[in-house]
Amino acid sequence: MFKGKFIDNLPKIYGTYTGGFIVFIILMAIAEQAGMSAKLIGIFFVAFTVLIYALIGYLSRTMQTDAYYVAGRQVPTVFNGMATAADWMSGASFVAMAGGIYFKGYGYMALLVGWTGGYVLVASLLAPYLRKFGCYTVPDFIGTRYGGNLARLSAVIVLTVASFTYVTAQINATGTIASVALDIPFEIAVYVGLASILMCSMLGGMRAVTWTQVAQYIVLIIAYLLPVFWISNKMGAGVFPHFMLADEVARIAELEAQFGLGEIKNSAADLKQVPKGLAGITKAHAEVNTTPWKFISLAVCMMAGTASLPHVMMRYFTTPSVKAARRSVGWSLFFIFLLYSSAPMLATLSKLSLMDPNLATGIIGKSITEVQAIDWYQNWNQANLMFVSDFNGNGTLELNEFFMGGKAVVLATPEIAGLPYVISGLVAAGGMAAAMSTADGLVLAISNALSHDIYYKMINPKAETAKRLIVARVLLVLIGFAGATIAALEIQGILGSVIWAFDFAMSGLFFPLVLGVWWKRANAQGAVAGMLGGLIAGSAYLIAVRSGYPGFWGVTQLTFGIVGSLVSLVLMVVVSLMTKAPDAATQRMVDEVRIPSGKAILGKQH
Amino acid sequence: MSKQQQHWEKTRTLLFVTLAIWFVFSIGIFFFGAEMEASSIRPLGYPLSYYMTCQGSLGIFVILIFWFANRQEKIDEEFGYTEREDD
């Protein structure tokens, strides 16, 4: 069926895969009509997709370093774009983002702008140059550009802090979904999630992760878009929701006024009854509800963080050329855009479904007992994601008496809007794909940095290929387990840890990476001071704010990267200028990086 | 000025233009959230502030990156720095 090389057949292979997946969805829909239980459909969806990823992971096994670290540098532009989009869009984007928009409106959408705008920085400041460099990992670039083990080690430290913060959140998300879909306790589900993640990455490293991520992107984008289009059409809101929901947005504002949003406040005693983690609608849907600085500072942190997160950057090391790396960033953002521009539409549809008394699905204004008798309400109430209470004792459900968890917006909306259960199963598979693909990228980024930069470059430069790759795999498993163990403790929410990861990465890596390409005078002493100083300053600010310090310039625990990166910039410039300029060889190396043609700085096998 | 310096000069100019456009749509316009909301410009009927955060800025970033990549390729070609396909 497929003649020739794997790479030449990619469109055919993934076309067949997509077709197969759609057939699977249809089969499940038929099975549902034939009476298959919702539980079983959920299990089938998650188990089937995870098995496919594991199979791809197994087929991509390799014993070559450049395949293991950079997928042999032959991933075509568009496919690398898809893989990056899956790598990038985590459980937070898939499960939590629409919920955040639903509850917090405009102020929250700074994340949308930040998480997309960052790619302009990636494309123009970094990706093509790092690709030309020919490195395997981000610390590999820092270590070679600035020279010296101290610079390399500092980069590994920042990378590990940022990526590890991020990965615990993703393993947590895979655990949450696996526990709901497979009906097993969370503490066990976390390890089921971990096993699936390792199956995708252990045997084939970056090569396996690349091809599973493409497969995961296809699942997650279908799982996200299908319900949005379906609900919009079912509701009669428009065939193409992205362009046609203006009336619905206006209608929500009308209903908000009618139901007295913001006028009726719940007393503290009433709010005590509400289970932890659930929230009511307190902010207007489309109103500008935050100060410009709050919006902009959050967006800036997410953008600079995007350009500094190693698991994203290393995806561009896998393209065949510098030109392809640049274009690949564009494709990545296009594929991300497909999901991100749909999240606000999903939030709008979800809110209107619940609020509008003219729709059959609307619950606000109905009697409390009636709402409590609805099937989906009972299910999600049991899952601790929904709650109603008759605070004012009038027997009807008011807007301020309805509470929901952030995850429920994505996970429960298909059910609320009256879609068949097969869609909910699909959404669970999509969420699993999103969390797994990001976790894979992150675990690999950390273990590659430790195995390549610490073990091979610093401890044992004479290690043979086989030994290096065994070390890489052992580290991968260890880091996965460490991540899962911490995830099982559930210290910080999914979204909170993700935002922190961006701030950590930005604090320590943004300026050392950018100036490495754009400022020849930057030297090792400056870079080390910038990385460590930035990371320490950022962390110190975070800890101080968490323990009650009011902070300055309106910088909060979500935007501490601003403090960290400014300290990093100042230290880097001052220390660089106070110490000796980099030698002629380093200067020539930077010149060489700045033009696309010619040999890579680091050889094909290093 | 050597060929390489000229190439870098042009690359830098392109970077500044790209970053200027990026700045306007990622930071600049959000200084005026309230003004955008009150504006009579309503793309597809959405309030301008809402539209820019949902689609407007995001879409502009996608186009901007492809435009940037095209321009950079032209600059590389002009100075003969394009990679060989078999590299």
Image: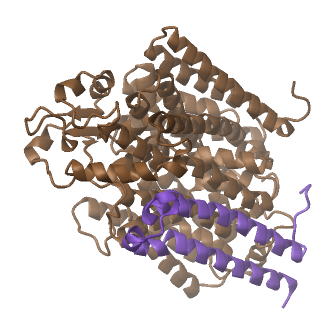
Note whether residue A563 is visible.
no
Label count reads 0
Note whether residue A582 is visible.
yes
Left or right for A359, reference A193: left
Q: Nearer the viewer, residue B75 or B44?
A: B44
Q: Nearer the viewer, residue A563 or A324?
A: A324
Q: In this rendering, is residue A527 above or below A9?
A: below
Left or right for A593, reference A598: left
Residue A457: percent from left, percent from top: 68, 55
The answer to which quarter of the image holds residue A471 is top right
Left or right for A521, reference A60: left
Chain given the colour brown:
A
Colouring method of the image: by chain
For the N terminus of chain A, give its image quadrant. top right
The residue under the point 32% across, 53% down is: A253
The answer to which quarter of the image holds residue A137 is bottom right
The residue under the point 77% across, 43% down is: A67
The residue sitting at the bottom extreme is B1
The answer to which quarter of the image holds residue A603 is bottom right
The residue under the point 49% across, 42% down is: A94
Residue A310: percent from left, percent from top: 59, 55
Q: Nearer the viewer, residue A406 or A314?
A: A406
The residue sitting at the top extreme is A34
Residue B51: percent from left, percent from top: 48, 60
Residue A482: percent from left, percent from top: 46, 38
Chain B: give its colour.
Answer: purple
